[in-house]
Image: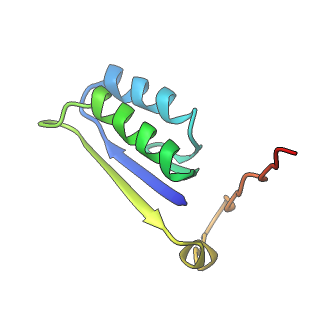
Amino acid sequence: MYVLVSYDIVDDRVRNRLMKYLMDFGERIQLSVFECDLDEATYLKMKKGVETIVNRKEDSVRFYRLCRGCVDRVVISGWGEIKEDEGFEII
């Protein structure tokens, strides 16, 4: 699944920690936005990790799960491109 993650974090240290954590799951496309191509188990792992980092009373993290058809309809104005990781097969 394709997941767009956006966040608004109050504390600089927490924001930096979250950014570094999310880099293991996707690509940073803007200062507080990541695009991630994940399977269900990895998505749940990422979401659980995010919830241990952020302060639920002060911070906001949004996970937008997009279907493949929605990803095909993304329009970008300016620089940037949609990147899809190449899949692999275990033989």
Q: Position of residue 33 (x, y in %)?
A: 46, 49
> Residue 90's x, y, as percent?
82, 44
At a point 38% along the width and 41% down the height, the residue shown is 47
Q: Is residue 39 left or right of residue 12?
A: right
**Which residue extends farthest top?**
13
Picture quarter with the N terminus = bottom right
Whole-percent x, y for residue 84 in the image: 71, 57
Q: Residue furthest front?
A: 91
Using the image, determine if residue 8 lies above or below residue 54: below
Q: Position of residue 70 (x, y in %)?
A: 54, 76
Q: How many numbered marks does the figure carry? A: 0
Q: Residue at x 40, y 61 (%)?
A: 64
In front here: 62 or 41? 41
Q: Residue at x 31, y 27 (%)?
A: 53
Q: Is residue 64 above or below residue 58?
A: below
Q: Is residue 64 above or below residue 30?
A: below
Task: Give me the residue at 43% from left, 51% from top.
Answer: 5
Residue at the limit of the structure toward the left, as seen here: 57
Residue 2 is left or right of residue 83, and the answer is left
Residue nearest the viewer, comparing 15 with 45? 45
* Quarter of the C terminus within the rendering: top right
Question: What sort of colour scheme is used for the picture?
Answer: rainbow
Residue 27, placed above or below residue 83: above
